[in-house]
Amino acid sequence: MPSLMIHRNDTVKVLTGADRGKTQRVLRVIPDKSAVLVEHVRVVKKTVSSKTGQNTRGGIAEQESPIHVSNVALVCPNCGIARVAMKKDGAMRVRYCKKCGQTLPTKK
Ligand SMILES: [Zn+2]
């Protein structure tokens, strides 16, 4: 499985599409598709039908749809957009900003 440079809870900037320029948090990473779900980005409205016997109401639900990782850029706390690379730090592989050298922590 390819390991993605972008992790859950990272802050990314959207590079393409209608949400271009937005800086938002990554909600979920989908490694199989090299895609991420980004908060408030590519939101689609889904019609939810009410089901008899269940306590759900029909209506419209909003849900993010996945966006390819190549369409987002990690945000460096110092520089804004980061060109991120991996380096070895002892036994760990860490991400760092190529521009300022800042290590980007992996938030849990
Ligand atoms: Zn930086």
Image: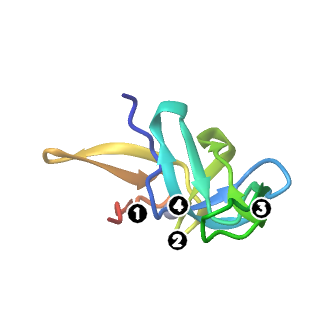
* Whether the residue under disc 2 has CB within 8 Å of ligand 1: yes
Separation of residues labelled 1 and 2 (CA atoms): 8 Å
Residue situated furthest right in the rendering: 18
Category of crowding for the residue at label 3, using alpha-carbon neighbours closer than 10 angstroms: few (below 14), some (14–19), many (at least 20): few
- Total marks shown come to 4
The scheme the figure's colours follow is: rainbow
Which badge, 3 or 2, comes first in the chain's sequence? 3
Q: Provide the secondary structure element on which disc 3 rests.
A: loop
Q: CA distance from mark 1 to mark 3?
A: 22 Å
Q: CA distance from mark 3 to mark 2?
A: 18 Å
Q: Return the residue nearer the eye: 83 or 99.
A: 83
Quarter of the figure with the C terminus:
bottom left
Mark whose residue sits in front, 4 or 1: 4
For residue 78, the mark is 2
Q: Amino acid at mark 1?
A: Gln
- Mark 2 crowdedness (10 Å alpha carbons): few <14, some 14-19, many ≥20: few
Q: Which residue is mark 1?
A: 102
Looking at the picture, which amino acid does disc 4 mark? Leu
Residue 79 drawn at (x, y percent): 58, 66
Residue receiving disc 4: 27
For discs 4 and 2, the disc positioned in front in the rendered view = 4
Mark closer to the chain start, 1 or 3: 3
Task: Work out whether residue 64 or residue 89 is closer to the camera in this orientation and state it.
Answer: 64
* Residue to which mark 3 is pinned: 21
